[in-house]
Amino acid sequence: MRIVLDSNILIRAFAKSQGLANELLLAILAGDHTLILSNEMLFELARVLRYPRLAAVHGQNEEAIYIFTGWLRDAAEVIALNPLTAAPITRICASAA
């Protein structure tokens, strides 16, 4: 099965090595599953992990972020996104109901 994890789950997996997010990530990678990521997702992950608030709370440095994102890149199938593909976005208005 091919699985995409939200960046919030990946951030939690990075921050708490004993947490459920980390267990989920390791189970996906250890099983018959393929983690799907894109370069854009990895960039977003690294950017968010550098937020001062997260760095202060989790005490992770630049090297740890680099190692984690590199490990994810090696462990996952990194796909290229098509910049011409547009996802339809539907606005939900209270007056439309």
Image (tube, rainbow, N blue to C red):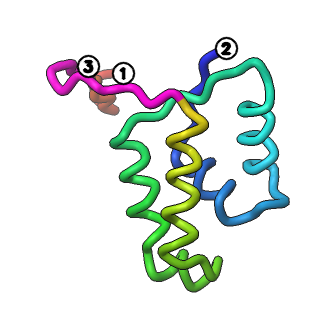
Mark 1 to mark 2: distance in Å?
38 Å
* Residue type for callout 3: Pro
Query: What residue sits 54% from the left and 78% below the top?
Result: 61
Q: Position of residue 72 (x, y in %)?
A: 56, 45
The verdict on residue 47 being magenta is: no
Say if 50 sits above or below 2 in the image.
below
Q: Are marks 1 and 3 in contact (CB under 8 Å)?
A: no
Q: Position of residue 13 (x, y in %)?
A: 68, 54
Q: Tell me where the magenta segment starts and ends, as one range.
A: 77-88
45 or 31, which lies in front? 31
Placement of the N terminus among the 4 image quadrants: top right
* Residue furthest bottom as drawn: 56
88 or 86, which lies in front? 86
SS type, badge 1? loop
Placement of the C terminus among the 4 image quadrants: top left
**Which quarter of the picture shows residue 86?**
top left
Mark 1 to mark 3: distance in Å?
20 Å
Query: What residue sits 38% from the left and 63% below the top?
Result: 47
Horizontal placement of 83 versus 68: left or right? left
Horizontal placement of 27 versus 89: left or right? right
Q: Give the residue number, with chain letter if any, for mark 1.
A: 97
Q: Earlier in the sequence, mark 1 or mark 3?
A: 3
Q: Position of residue 83 (x, y in %)?
A: 18, 27
Which of the numbered marks, if any, corresponds to residue 1? 2
Say if 20 sits above or below 93 in the image.
below
SS type, badge 3? loop
Q: Give the residue number, with chain letter if any, for mark 3.
A: 88
Mark 3 to mark 2: distance in Å?
26 Å
Horizontal placement of 53 versus 16: left or right? left
* Label 1 vs label 2, nearer the camera: 2
Query: What residue sits 57% from the left and 69% below the top?
Result: 64
